Image (cartoon, rainbow, N blue to C red):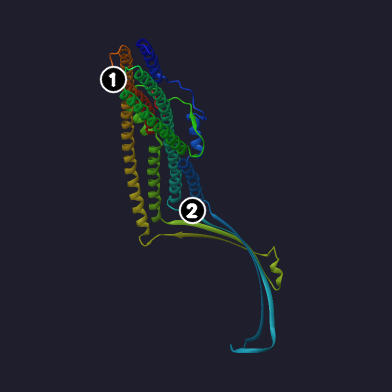
Amino acid sequence: MTPNRVFALLALALAAAPAHLGAQDAQPRQGEPLTLQQALRTAEENNPAYRRALTEIGTAQADVRRARGAFLPELSLSMGVGGSYSRALTGTGQFGEVVRREEALESNGSNSTQSISLSGLTLFDGGQRRRDLRAARAGQGSVAARVGSEEIRMRADVARRYWESVRTDRVIRLEEELMASARDRLVLTQALVRVGVRGPLDVLGAEVAVAEQEQALERARGEARKAQLDLRQAMGVIQGGWLRLTDEPPAMFDPSTLNTEALVASSLSTHPRIQRVDLVVTQSDERYGASRAGRLPRLSMGASVGRNQRYTDYAGLVGINPLDQSAGLNFSLSVPLFTGYRTTYQIQSARAATVAAREDARGERLALEREVRGALVDLDNAFRAARNAERTLGLNRQRLELAQEQYRVGALTLNDLTDAVERASRAERDALRTRFEFAAALATLEERAGAPVRP
């Protein structure tokens, strides 16, 4: 093989290497297509934590109905029939002595009763029921806010895992391209050895590079499989085949264009986490007021209407229209003079719960503000890291092109070329990683803000 032939082969192989490194539009993998919105809808239907939070809504609604029912009296209907039979051989004499009869005295009878009673109609309780109802409504709102907060957390978690899965899939494509480039360099080195330009040591170095790249590819495939399992877990459906994720990560923007103070203020006023703790404070206040009403008198009334009749035979067992009628109305006033300190305990406990709820609300505001500001810092760092990675990638690509030109004219060793290729490969990986780190940081910021964030 002539030197001109060697350099022609070398130029051909080196021209193919950058194509492997720079290619971005690889053929899509086979699998079930899945967009981010489809993943979110699947999670809404199957995510266990979110579905469990939804079950609490029914309990809160039942608590509101219970509190409303305290304003209504209890109504009960009772019906009863009975029969009796007796046979007596003894009686009582004039002075109370026991007298034995010559003949047994037999008797039988029956009775029928029907009544409707109304009880528990409280006319005055110091506002206890009204405060209980307000507390139940605040509790219902708190549960709804918690469900909203759980939905935001679930959507952000699915988005982060979706973008991580997309990233690992892109890493597989990149590692495959780097594998093809490493094999091209091995073929080139073997050709150079045959013409005496390179030695066996260069071949071993190229083979080591191929083996290392094979390991990197296998690691990438394993990471992709685990990332898809994480995504499926977040969606609540762990079973299934390979998912072909079709969405592209959100476009990057400079976070410095965001108004930090406005974003923090919006989060503190609209985030479901803050709404939940505020409603818990309201609920605690109402329960405190209800416990204090336990020291006030309670006035209630009741009424009843009934029919009954006694029979000298067993006709009452089937009687449905008793003739005797009765009606009654009663009022009761109870004044709690001493309850064994139970009322005092309830008041003190409710007061402590109110103070604790206010401190929890203050702590939640501090935590959320810190999380929003921290997420903004993380997003800014991710943006700058992505920009630096892109700039580094561009420089490494230029460096690789220059190294290839120098290698063509024999001014550079294979080790120097391999070093340039490896640096370019790391730059490709870093650029890909930082691009998706920005997407994950944006999902976290939107979780903290409770709403989409765009400049």
Residue 434 versus residue 371 in the image, above or below? above
Mark 2 residue crowding within 10 angstroms, few (<14) / some (14–19) / many (20+)? some
Residue 455 visible in this rendered orientation of the protein: no
Identify residue for label 2: 123
Quadrant into which the C terminus falls = top left
Residue 96 versus residue 25 in the image, above or below? below
The answer to which of 361 and 165 lies nearer the viewer is: 165
Most extreme residue toward the top is 4
Q: Position of residue 79 (x, y in %)?
A: 63, 63
> Disc 2 vs disc 1: which is toward the camera?
1
Quadrant into which the N terminus falls = top left
The answer to which of 368 and 347 lies nearer the viewer is: 368
Q: Secondary structure at mark 2?
A: strand
Residue 393 visible in this rendered orientation of the protein: yes
- Calculate the distance from the C-alpha at mark 2 to the C-alpha at mark 1: 94 Å
The answer to which of 418 and 65 lies nearer the viewer is: 418
Identify residue for label 1: 416
Query: Which numbered circle lies on residue 350?
Result: none
Residue appearing at x 43%, y 47% in the figure: 131
Q: Quadrant of residue 305?
A: bottom right
Q: Position of residue 340 (x, y in %)?
A: 36, 62
Q: Is residue 444 left or right of residue 92?
A: left
Mark 1 is on which residue type?
Asp
Q: Secondary structure at mark 1?
A: helix
Mark 2 and mark 1 lie on one chain; the one further toward the N terminus is 2
Q: Position of residue 343 (x, y in %)?
A: 37, 57
Q: Position of residue 119 (x, y in %)?
A: 53, 58
Mark 2 is on which residue type?
Leu
Dot 2 and dot 1 residues touching (CB under 8 Å) = no
Residue 444 versus residue 120 in the image, above or below? above
